[in-house]
Amino acid sequence: MTTVTELALTSNEVALAETFEALPDLEIRIKSIVAEGPQQAMPLVWISGEPQAAIEDALADDSSVTEFDRLIEGSDTDENLYRIEYATGVSNMCSAIFSNDGTILDAQCSATNWTFRLLFPERNLLSETVGELEDQGITVDVKRMVEAGRNADLEETAALTEAQEEAINEAYDRGYYDVPRRISLEDLAAELDISHQALSERLRRANKVLASEQIGQPGHDEIAH
């Protein structure tokens, strides 16, 4: 049975921990991860939150980064798109995924964790991957795992992004889900400094993910190595 899982890997065991240490306010969005042969991984990432010069100085000093190129340039602290080549450890990590027929659906990066959403055609291949990652000295936290049928909507198997989690937590705390509501969507969006449309979309997707966990989805079984 096809398995979709969310794995959290400690940043200082993967990549970019030194960059985050130098620039704590940095924001990184993973655009895509492309396999270029069994040992290669070249993520495209949007980076913002700090001046461009500071970002590039930090990347140049980061021992987990061997090469980077700026592909699309924003204005100062706006988002810039980079293509980053990582040191051997990241290639080995991705090789463990790809060699077990895994597909990286998406990924997130923060100061503490890299979070990957992965798809495997068989559950035992996920177990093999986790074992190989641990053999590489990487701490693996299986955050979520679901069995996906042939006609599964992969969006429903997604984990909440940090932005979605923040939105739904704030909505709950501020009384958006109370009856009657204590705050409108417009006012909540203003407090979060995002557009009404963006907040509506984040809440819709977050609610869909949470609902999918409660309706006909298998639980968070432990993975036996």
Image (cartoon, helix red, strand yellow):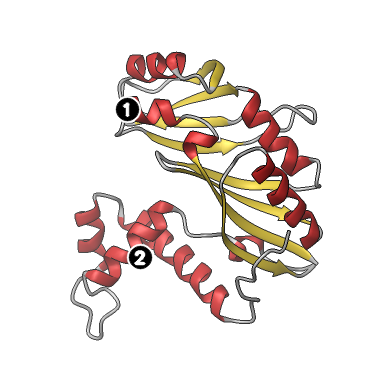
- Which type of secondary structure does the marked residue at label 2 adopt? helix
User: What's under tag 1, amino acid-wise?
Assistant: Leu
In the drawing, does residue 51 fall left or right of residue 106? left
Residue sitting at x 79%, y 31%: 38
User: What's under tag 2, amino acid-wise?
Assistant: Ile
- On residue 1, the disc is none
How far across and how far down the image is residue 212, in percent?
A: 57, 74
Furthest residue toward bottom: 179
Q: Residues within 10 Å of mark 2 (few under 14, many from 20)?
A: many
195 vs 20: above or below: below
30 vs 3: above or below: above
How far across and how far down the image is residue 114, in percent?
A: 51, 43
Residue sitting at x 21%, y 55%: 190
Are the residues at dot 2 and dot 1 in contact (C-beta closer than 8 Å)? Answer: no
How far across and how far down the image is residue 58, in percent?
A: 39, 18
Work out whether residue 37 or residue 12 is closer to the camera in this orientation and state it.
Answer: 12
Residue bearing mark 1: 23
N-terminal of the two: label 2 or label 1?
1
In the drawing, does residue 43 fall left or right of residue 53? right
Q: Quadrant of residue 151?
A: bottom right
Residue sitting at x 23%, y 75%: 175
Q: Give the Cα separation between the discs numbered 2 and 1.
A: 27 Å
How far across and how far down the image is residue 187, in percent?
A: 20, 62
Q: Quadrant of residue 104?
A: top right
127 vs 77: above or below: below
**Quarter of the image where the N terminus is located:** bottom right
Q: Residues within 10 Å of mark 1 (few under 14, many from 20)?
A: some
- Which type of secondary structure does the marked residue at label 1 adopt? loop
Residue sitting at x 70%, y 32%: 92
Q: Quadrant of residue 66?
A: top right
Residue bearing mark 2: 168
104 vs 155: above or below: above
